[in-house]
Image: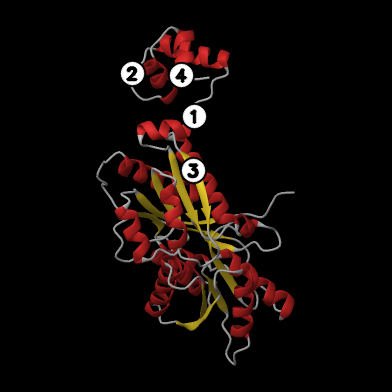
Amino acid sequence: MTTSDVAKRAGVSQAAVSRALTGRGYISEEKKERVIRAARELGFQPNAIARSLITKTSGIIAIVVADLRYSFYITLIHELSQALRAQGYQGMLVSLPYGEEIDGALSEVIAYRVDGIVIASARLSSKATEMCREGNIPTVLINRDVVGSTFGAVTADNIRSGKLAAAFLLAGGHRRLAFVAGMADTSPTVDRETGFCDEAARLSASAGLRRDGHSTYEGGYRAVLDLMGLDSPPDAICCASDIMAIGAMDAIRHRLGLRVPEDVSITGFVNADIARWESYRLTSISVDPGAMSQRAVRMLTDLIRGKPLDVTKERLMGRLVIRESARLPSPDAMAKLKDYDIVWDPPFET
């Protein structure tokens, strides 16, 4: 079955069939309904691959992600896919092994003649950047940025979020702070640690203790065992991701027999679904994957249409969601945090 058959059945031209089925170009509602009815009666299904050869567009956006083990990126991909569909595009997921650079997969992505690329949680080398430029493929980064990159990027304001984490823990009366870093050399973990340490130093507190947790549960578990084994262990630990914070809490409770937050406070980042679970009730700085996705897709579609970007780097403010894993500051201390966005998430109702 071809568009010629549909055109004959509907009594219109093939060009009218193309306009009706692709949504591109003007066609009256009456003709459009005739085409759709004829296509349905004949069981016609458009061949997207054949159409892409004619239009030179595929309608496909590659979503490249390097870590699908944890819920935040699953949620982010869902939000991205919905935002892309609303703009008439289909998302094609490209999943890389943890920590792998995008270079190896990028040539395959380009071979699919994608209309654009969204890169989340993947290492972006100078070679990969050049490949996107040479292929003239609009590319946007989400939840990370690369120093010196000219790509559009939508991220959380991770430096300010790091400052908020330190300010909150210090307001709770803690003075020996530690930071558990995530994947090395990625902008979220670097910026969160920078903001955390800068704010601790500004408030005359010690934040020199740090360990690498490699953005994994096991890494957070081992990092905290090491920190708590020191002669002067921390009384509060900020982890650069929720999954590391969950590993930290399990190590403290089940391996060391200590209490959270009575013996040590724990905070995380991104406010993943697991942070709300009754066993953890993790205080975490929220990143809104829906808002990030909407802005990234808007940025990408502007690039595809050749529209210059008003802003190439967008940073969204984080929100501290207070639960029971960290000591709650006094009302007077909380009042000093009025410039930050802070909410309390109550326990589940029975």
Separation (CA) of disc 3 from disc 2: 26 Å
Q: Position of residue 72 (x, y in %)?
A: 56, 55
Q: Nearer the viewer, mark 2 or mark 1?
A: 1
Q: Earlier in the sequence, mark 3 or mark 2?
A: 2
Separation (CA) of disc 3 from disc 1: 17 Å
Q: Which amino acid does the dot numbered 3 rest on?
A: Gly
| Number of residue marks | 4
Q: Which amino acid does the dot numbered 4 rest on?
A: Thr
Could you say which disc has been placed on residue 91 in the image? 3
Q: Which amino acid does the dot numbered 2 rest on?
A: Tyr
Q: Secondary structure at mark 2?
A: loop
Q: Residue furthest bottom?
A: 231
Horizontal arrangement in the rendering, residue 319 relative to residue 344 (left or right) = left
Separation (CA) of disc 2 from disc 1: 21 Å
Residue under numbered circle 4: 3
Q: Which amino acid does the dot numbered 1 rest on?
A: Asn
| Contact, mark 2 vs mark 1 (Cβ under 8 Å) | no
Q: Earlier in the sequence, mark 4 or mark 3?
A: 4
Q: Nearer the viewer, mark 4 or mark 3?
A: 4
